Every structure is written in structure tokens, then in C-alpha cells.
Image (tube, coloured by chain):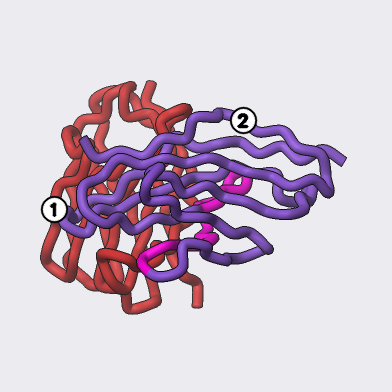
């Protein structure tokens, strides 16, 4: 099992450009999450999904969109990147929602100039 | 407000000595509590969790944590630290009544030979 994988690992964007981050999991998990990690702030939840075809807002959803067209994939989109979106993005998945362990991908380091 | 706090940005300990990484939480109801570890340039890895039952929870790599409801704390402990334990540690909490997951800001553990 590859677990949770993220593509790409690094990316540099100019302000206003768009991009999509791809997360894939091969554990047949129902739940998937996108977080951003910033120094001194821990991880903050951007969006999450409780199953194929569903998405919901997390703590910091503004400026991001997501889609879960297939159970194994969870896409995070930035339509018009801003420097404030410079961060490390982590995807995670879990079998259950409430008390279950989350499995994290290796992260994507995004810089917006 | 739902939150989790890690009051120490950094903890320094000598190899072989016991270590404690502190975490306090503020949620309504009975929380689900987690500890994750992050090594450089890696995603987070699950260490242990408390859902219900015995207040002392044992996890991976010899770590354990004690749930204290009256003090709303969930401190991570290890009897004898290893240099390889040096990493960033995150406490996380989920309020079962909400589909949200909150992470602390992280504590950097430095174990010196």
C-alpha cells in the first residue's frame, strides 16, 4: 500500500495563477481532509469530505475549492493564488470520522510570489 | 471556542531522561484526543489516542499520555528519551459533536546526547 500520496511535492506560483493539488489514498477510506501548516499555527483544516461526491468547509476554507469525484481522490484547487496561501499543504484520510486515526500524506510545499 | 493549546514551543531533554510534552484542550462534551509526530519534511504520524476508558494511554515508540479531565490536559510522556525522538509533536482534539478537528501549534522536542 502506498498509503496517502500527494502531487506535486513542490510548486511555485505567481499571484493570480491557479493550480490543483491532488491527493490519493489506497486504503478505501471514506473520509479525506486538506490541511495547511504554517509556522507557529499548527495544522488548520481547509476542507474535508465524508464520502465520494461530498465536501464540507473546515476552519479556513476561503480561497480554496475541493472536489471528491472518486472515493480515492481528493483535489484541492486554488483559483487565484495569493501570497497568503504560501504554506505546506497536507492531505489526510481516515476510515471513520470521529475517533479514528488520520493518515497523512508527505505534504506539498507551495510558494506564491 | 474549540481549541487545543501546547504551551511550550520547544522542550529540551537529555537522552535517557524522562520527557513530557504538554497539551491542554478546551472543548464541550467528551473529547477525542490524539498525539501525532512529524519528522522533518514528512507528514504527521499517529502516536496514540484517547477515546474512552483508562486515562493512561500507551502508544507507539514507548510514548504514553495521560488524560486528565479535571485539568483538561493530555500530556505526552516517555520514561527515557532517545535522540531519535527529536521531532515536532502535535496534540489534536475532536469534539464528537462537531465534524472538526483541531491541532495545537506544535512542540519541538530536542533530545541531546
Indicate the position of residue B5 as horizontal and vertical percent values: 41, 35
Q: Quadrant of the C terminus of chain B?
A: top right
On the image, numbered disc 1 is attached to which residue? Answer: A56
Q: Examine the rendered structure and indicate whether residue B52 appears above or below residue B82.
A: below
Residue B43 falls within the magenta-colored stretch: yes
Query: Which shade of the palette goes to chain A?
Result: red
Q: Quadrant of the N terminus of chain B?
A: top left
Residue extending furthest toward the right: B113
Q: Name the residue at 49% across, 30% down.
A: B7
Foreground pick, B74 / B62: B74
Q: Would residue B39 appear left or right of A109 to someone viewing this image?
A: right
Q: Which lettered chain is shown in purple?
A: B
The crowd level at tag 2 (other Cα within 10 Å; few <14, some 14-19, many 20+) is some
Total numbered badges shown on the rendered structure: 2
Report the span colored magenta: B36-52
Secondary element at tag 2: strand
Q: Name the residue at 59% across, 59% down.
A: B64
Q: Name the residue at 19% across, 51% down.
A: A66
Indicate the position of residue B25 as horizontal and vertical percent values: 36, 42
Q: Examine the rendered structure and indicate whether residue B56 appears above or below residue A108.
A: below
Whether residue A70 is visible here, answered yes or no, is: yes
Residues at marks 1 and 2 touching, judged by CB atoms closer than 8 Å: no
Gap in angstroms between the C-alphas marked 1 and 2 = 34 Å
Amino acid at each position: 500500500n502506498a498509503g496517502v500520496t500527494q502531487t506535486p511535492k513542490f510548486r511555485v506560483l505567481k499571484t493570480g495563477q491557479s493550480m490543483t493539488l491532488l491527493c490519493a489514498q489506497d486504503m478505501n477510506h471514506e473520509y479525506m481532509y486538506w490541511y495547511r501548516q504554517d509556522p507557529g499555527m499548527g495544522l488548520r483544516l481547509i476542507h474535508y469530505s465524508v464520502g465520494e461526491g461530498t465536501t464540507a468547509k473546515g476552519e479556513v476554507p476561503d480561497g480554496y475549492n475541493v472536489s471528491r469525484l472518486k472515493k480515492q481522490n481528493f483535489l484541492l484547487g486554488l483559483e487565484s493564488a495569493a501570497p497568503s496561501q504560501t504554506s505546506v499543504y497536507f492531505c489526510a484520510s481516515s476510515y471513520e470520522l470521529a475517533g479514528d486515526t488520520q493518515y497523512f500524506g508527505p505534504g506539498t510545499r507551495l510558494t506564491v510570489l | 471556542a474549540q481549541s487545543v493549546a501546547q504551551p511550550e514551543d520547544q522542550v529540551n531533554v537529555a537522552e535517557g531522561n524522562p520527557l513530557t510534552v504538554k497539551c491542554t484542550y478546551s472543548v464541550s462534551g467528551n473529547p477525542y484526543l490524539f498525539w501525532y509526530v512529524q519528522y522533518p519534511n514528512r507528514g504527521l504520524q499517529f502516536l496514540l489516542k484517547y477515546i474512552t476508558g483508562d486515562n493512561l494511554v500507551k502508544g507507539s515508540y514507548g510514548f504514553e499520555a495521560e488524560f486528565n479531565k479535571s485539568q483538561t490536559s493530555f500530556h505526552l510522556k516517555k520514561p527515557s528519551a532517545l535522540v531519535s525522538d527529536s521531532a515536532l509533536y502535535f496534540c489534536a482534539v475532536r469534539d464528537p459533536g462537531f465534524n472538526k478537528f483541531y491541532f495545537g501549534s506544535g512542540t519541538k522536542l530536542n533530545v541531546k546526547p
